[in-house]
Structures are given as structure tokens and as C-alpha cells.
Amino acid sequence: MVTVHPIFDFVGLFSWFKRADMSLRLMAIGMLLLLPLLKWMPMFIMVTFLLLVREKFTRGEQLLNFRFSVIGMGMLVFFAAYVLGLLWTENDNLGSRNIEYKLSFILLPFFFNQFSHFVEVRRWIQIFILGLFINSFLLIGFASYRTLTADEADIWKFWQESEFSFFLHRSYLAAYMSIGALLMIGLFLKLRKITLLFLFFLFTLMIVLSASKAGLIVLLLGSFLIVLRYAINNFRSRRIRLFSVLFVLSLFLTVLLSEVVRIRFQSAWKALFTAEVVNNKSKDSTEARVMMWSASWELIQGHFWLGLGTGDVDDELQKINIARNNQGVVQQKLNSHNQFLTIFLQLGVFGFIFFILGLLYLFQFYWKQRSAFGVVILFVFVINFFFESFLETRAGLFPFCWLILSTTSFVGEGTKNIHHEISVV
């Protein structure tokens, strides 16, 4: 009898989908189309939740589950901290909008609790990878269509950067594609199946076409660490050592052979060490980040304990850059472009420490569960936190909560329940 690895068990996935209740089918479709339908996901979740309540009522089961995992409870506390931050916020409009975005911290833990005993993590990994595959061909198909029907001379622009990533900001697209790419290369080294290598290069192509520097850094660093660990574990095999070296070199060459990527990295490296933080008119993304990081650090020193509150950060950053005559970033009205700095600015040192402890707890959780998927997700998000205020937009916060809760709330292989529960009632 041939054993099928769970990642390839699409027959089993299809059978599971046919047996599942309608609410669970909708939730699976939500995972599949998470990225292109991101704006519609709140409505999608509402319909799914109502269907689930109806199904539970029909079966005579308890309608609602108010027992939260440690991770879910942490999200609730973090949301409460943002609400508390409204007390010392002057810009109430921006503060209220920020709270609206942060509702994912309270709604998604509650939503996932209702499904916690119905889904296996492995099914969710399959659906997520299948979703990335579908999204890749959606992007390629749309770029091909625009190329064939365009009347302009520069038809290749549809394959570059924001033009290519038409339904999601390219930095966020690259982040989610890098999760798939790193998982695929890890599985390929374990299973040696060519399909996995094809998926790795497909997701890598999406990252390269997006030309996101953060996405490429995550891809290169993550691939290097995964291959290095594999080579160390199999150090006695000369063939494996040679393969590891050749793979890493070929990956770096493949990425750097892209002229757009090479130029972006060269300019970014130069800007990182030479960018002026005063009297700077540049709108270059790397120079802008250096200016915003500098302005953020100045604000942190003056608001170390409590921060600026939930809604005042962007206004205060704008004031500093106006005073410094940084006209480029003033026109763009940028945020700090670093999630760690943003949280420190919003909630002070206590909010910052709580956030770091939460990430450490997640790492410990995934490591204890031996969840490669979870470790990859956390690695990708943490690296991106250094370059983007990832959790300040729906495109970053919603998938972050969705993916973290997907891998910590559901039933794991060989276990009944893989998380401790805390009752809030």
C-alpha cells in the first residue's frame, strides 16, 4: 500500500470537503480565497458564523464556545490595550479607525473557537498551499491578459511590482508567497518530490515579480537557514553537502539576475547607510524607511512609558518630518514602517514587552508542537515586522490573525487539543 503524505492527499481533502457541514465548507473557501477576497472576508465570516450557529442548534449542541486559548486570550488583551490607548489620544478619528482594524484581535479568536474541534491543522495547510497556487495562476493569467490586450508600448509593466500584484500590496503578497515557498523547500528536502520544487519556484517567481525587498530577504534568508539545517543534519553525505551549496547559489543567482531586483537592492544598500534624516526630499522607499525609523526613535525617547496612544502616532511622525524638512515623506504621510517601533509608539514600553512576549510564546508553542508550518509563518511575519507596520492595515492584520489562529486553535495530528484553554465567563 502506497502511503500518501498529507500535503499531497487531495483526494482525502476532497472527501473531507464533501462530508463537512456547509459552515465548514465556507470557512475552507475563505482560507482558499483569503488574499484576493480580503476586503470581503468580514462579511464572509459573518455568514459562516450564522450558518454554524444554525447547524449547532439543529444538532442540539452548545451554540457558543467562550473558552479561549492562551494565544486567543493574548489577542483579546492586546485589543483591550488599544482601547485603553484611546484615553491619551488626541486624534479620536484616527484612533477609532485604528480600533476598527484591530477588531480582528477580538473577532477572529472568538470565530475560530467555534470551529476548534472540527478541523485538523494538516487540512488547513493543504488549503492554504492550494490557495497560493490558485492565486499565483490568477496573477499570471491577469498579467497575460493585460499584456495581450494592451494598446501601450510598455506591455511588460504588467509583470512588475504593483501592476503585477493587482489585488494586494506587493509587500504583503510577497510575505504570504514566501510562507508557501519556504514550506515547499523544507518539504522537498524531506520528501524529494519534484512537485514541491515546482511549487517552490512558482511562489519564488511571484516574489521576484513583486520586487518586494522584504519578501526577497525573507525568501533568501529562510531558504538559506532551511538548507543549512538540512546540510548539518546530513553532513556526512557529500552529495547532500554539494546539493545544498549549489541550491543556495542557484537561488541567489536566480533572484539577482532580475534587473529590477538587482537595481532595487543596490539602491537600498546604498540608501541604508547614506540616507540623511534631515533636509531630505527623497521618496525612495529605503531612504524613507531610514527617515521614519529615526523619527520614530526620537518620539519613543519622549514617550517611553505610555506611548502616544492609539491614534496620534502618524500625526506626531508628520510633525517631526515637517520640522526636519523631509519633504518626500511629508508628502507621502508615511507610518514608521516597522511594527515593533509602531507598537512602542502606540502603547509604550509595556505594550512593546507584551508583544515581544507574545511572539516568544508563539515560537515556543510551535517548537513544542514540532510545527514547521507554524515556525515558517512566525519567521516570515517577524522579519516583515522590521520593514513594515504590518499589523496596521487589514491586508496585514487579518491574515496574521487568521494564519496564527489556524495553526494554534485547531486539532493537531495525533492530539485531541493542542492548546491550553482559558475561560472568560
Image: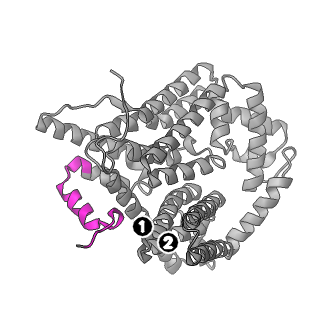
46 or 93, nearer to the observer:
46
The percent coordinates of residue 108 (x first, y second) are: 39, 38
Please determine whether, in this image, residue 150 is positioned above or below residue 122: below
- Mark seen at residue 202: 2
Is residue 21 highlighted in magenta?
yes
Please determine whether, in this image, residue 378 is positioned above or below residue 232: above
Specify the segment rendered in magenta.
2-24
Please tell me how many numbered marks the rendered image carries: 2
Callout 1 amino acid:
Phe
Residue at the spot 37% in from the left edge and 38% down from the top edge:
419
**Cα gap from disc 1 to disc 2, whole angstroms:** 8 Å
Reading the image, the residue beneath label 1 is: 133
Q: Residue furthest front?
A: 236
38 relative position to 2: left or right: right
Please determine whether, in this image, residue 295 is positioned above or below residue 246: above
The percent coordinates of residue 295 (x first, y second) are: 77, 38
Is residue 374 highlighted in magenta?
no
| Residues at marks 1 and 2 touching, judged by CB atoms closer than 8 Å | yes
Query: Quarter of the image holding residue 247?
Result: bottom right
Determine whether the residue tagged by mark 2 lies in a helix, strand or loop: helix
Q: Neighbour class for label 2 at 10 Å: few (<14), some, many (≥20)? A: some
